[in-house]
Image (cartoon, rainbow, N blue to C red):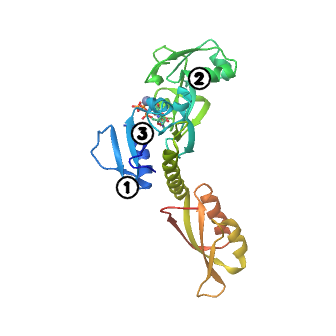
Amino acid sequence: MSDGTRLSIALQKSGRLSEDSLKLLADCNIRVSGSKGMLKADTAHFPATLLFLRDDDIPQYVADGVADIGIVGQNVLLEKGHAVTEKRPLGFGKCRLSLAVQKHIDYPGLAFFEGKEIATSYPGILGSYLKEHGVQASIHEISGSVEIAPSIGMAEGVFDIVSSGSTLFLNGLKEVEVVMRSEAVLVSRKGLPAEKEAILEKLLARIDAVIQSRQNKYLLLNAPNERLEEVIATIPGVKSPTVMPLAESGWSAIHSVIQEEDFWGSIDRLKALGVQGILVVPIEKMIL
Ligand code: PRT
Ligand code: ZN
């Protein structure tokens, strides 16, 4: 790597992805020194420069090579349609893009929207979806506060981001079709020079370790020896669990790693097998 080569990383300046993006980089030991409000900052201990932008601009900046990589929602990426490479889903900024109508409507299915107006900030994604399903509706593009459109008579439906659903509810709307699910992703420009590709590979290895550790927990428990095989089959861990005899005969201590996803299901199975003293500990980093 030649001196001075830095990977430029486009992040949302201020919004829903900002804190989680910076936290992910910080967990990778990539931090900016400097004050808030900067638009560009070099990172200490890692050859990168952070660029702080509006999320809508990130796909284009990366596609044009102004930034080498970026963190952005899949919804924005798909809407903008720029040619970038999706490298990793990042597990935060999760939401869905949905069609919604007024609560009192007896919704008959997608045919409801035939000949109607739909308000949205995502005309591209909505247009493709309607076309794919053979529905002719007119799309009313607005840049914000989409949810008020039906109550002011601007449209019969809305197409917008939903996460808890409370914004729809507060505006007298109900979700009727989930069109896509989205989360933040790391994207890279095409044709990254080899020196930068090498920096990106290092970053991705760190990100993978951080994401793995977030998705897994370290588990310690005591199991009766006669149920050992079933316990091990329930929590196989990374390679296989550590099994150590307890001072009390007939019992063993087991250490393993368990995935967040099937955590409660596994705990229920373990309890049914008679295990005791379950301890669950967060994992700082996980390198496989
Ligand atoms: O200023 P800039 O252009 O950078 O930011 P922005 O205002 O365009 O985007 P921002 O910060 O609101 O969102 C950035 C990204 O976060 C989005 O592109 C999504 O990928 C993701 N994300 C995750 C969300 C939400 N959850 C979300 N709930 N983006 C927006 N919302 C809004 C939604 O528009 C609606 O108004 O929150 C409301 C719905 O939330 P619930 O919980 O009431 O359903
Ligand atoms: Zn935006």
Give the residue at mark 1: 45
Which residue sits at x=57%, y=37%? Answer: 85
Q: Does residue 136 lie above or below 132 as drawn?
A: above
Which residue sits at x=69%, y=22%? Answer: 133
Give the residue at mark 2: 126
Q: Does residue 125 lie above or below 225 as drawn?
A: above
Distance (Cα) linking label 2 and label 3: 26 Å
In percent of width and height, residue 20 lies at 43, 46
Q: Quadrant of residue 278?
A: bottom right
**Marker disc for residue 11:** 3
Which residue sits at x=40%, y=41%? Answer: 18
Callout 3 amino acid: Leu
Distance (Cα) linking label 1 and label 2: 43 Å
Mark toward the start of the polypeptide (1 vs 3)? 3
Q: Residues within 10 Å of mark 2 (few under 14, many from 20)?
A: many
Q: Residue furthest top?
A: 115
Q: Residues within 10 Å of mark 3 (few under 14, many from 20)?
A: many
Disc 1 vs disc 3: which is toward the camera?
1
* Count of marks overlaid on the render: 3
Callout 1 amino acid: His
Q: Residues within 10 Å of mark 1 (few under 14, many from 20)?
A: few
Disc 1 vs disc 2: which is toward the camera?
1
Distance (Cα) linking label 1 and label 3: 19 Å
